[in-house]
Amino acid sequence: MKPFRAFLLGMLFSLNAIAQTFPSRPVTFIVPWPPGGSTDLAMRSIAVIAEKHLGQRIVIENKPGVSGTMGAQALAQGAKPDGYTIAQMPITVFRLPHMMKTNFDPTQDFTWIIHLTGYTFGVVVRSDSPWKTWGDMIAYAKANPGKLTYATPGNGTSLHITMENIAQREGIKWTQVPYKGYAEAAQGLLGGHVDVHSDSTGWGEQVNAGRLRLLCTWGAARTKRWPDVPTLKDLGYPIVSNSPYGLAGPKGMDPAAVKALHDAFKKALEDPEYVKTLEKFDQEAFYLNSEDYAALAKKTIEEERVAIQRLGLKM
């Protein structure tokens, strides 16, 4: 029993040392989207506040591509479970493994730290578009199968899944054009390379400036900034799509590091300055602690499997 007792004492000493010393250097925070988009800006905002409570810098590292799952790939492929590498985890992390082969498994490769918030999504067209309403756009799609093109941040994102869900319900076919993130897709729309852009509220300033027209939003209720714009529910679809997300690290993280990160980001989530950021992007706080986030992840993985199967999107 002596070797086992020595092992337990060693583990307790190690955890106590981590609790006292973590973090002793900057934390790398992977944002799996390009710089300048709404997710990037929101994550930079919360990181600046969280690092004040953590006592170390939080360094943003943008890794766009593969529908927002490059952070998950980095965590699963060699990141040490010491708390010094974390990532934003969009819902595509739970969805993409049901669509294609991935080098990560959401059921076992991650430590769930804290759930934060979700998006307000919407569909926009250029101001010179002939489609004044959502109904105009649907009518065109029905009359011209496959011709209408819509931009998204990538295959398997909630924007892609929801647009295909709508198409299935309407009995129409349109063509997705996947981009790496918001900025590239927005340029595609403004440049006339696509007809429609489905994304979060990075398009807000362009809508307010009159350069884009907002046809609908996808939340449970109309937005505060655009109360005259209908939701999908208003238009007759039983759909609410907001793609909630949180933060995670590699599997096997030290509990002391998880707690330190959770506590710092929870304080940041409640900070009045970050509340202003959420309001700017029409987002609402959706806090879950580490245990509850892990339970939500397990539930979401199964829900996404069923949805992908129903829509026939397995590649």
Image: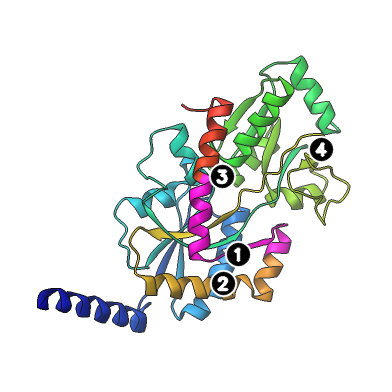
291 magenta-colored: yes
**Residue 91: where, in percent of width, then height?**
54, 47
Q: Which residue is mark 4?
A: 127
Question: In which quarter of the view is residue 159 placed?
Answer: top right
In this rendering, does residue 220 appear at all?
yes
Magenta part of the protein: which range? 278-300
Residue placed furthest toward the bottom: 20
Count residues near mark 1 (Cα–Cα under 10 Å), then give few for <14, some for 14-19, many for 20+: some
Using the image as rendered, state which of residue 67 and residue 265 is in the foreground.
265
Query: Mark 4 or mark 2, which has the lower sequence index?
Result: 4
Residue 287, labelled with which disc? Answer: 1
121 magenta-colored: no
Q: Nearer the viewer, mark 1 or mark 3?
A: 1
Q: Nearer the viewer, mark 4 or mark 2?
A: 2
Count residues near mark 4 (Cα–Cα under 10 Å), then give few for <14, some for 14-19, many for 20+: some
Q: Secondary structure at mark 3?
A: loop
> Is 3 displayed left or right of 51 in the figure?
left
The residue lying at 74 percent from left, 23 percent from top is: 170
Q: Secondary structure at mark 2?
A: helix
Residue type highlighted by circle 4: Ser
Q: Main secondary structure of the magenta part?
A: helix
Q: Which residue is mark 3?
A: 181
C-alpha distance separating marks 1 and 3: 25 Å
Q: Which residue is mark 2?
A: 266
Residue type highlighted by circle 2: Lys
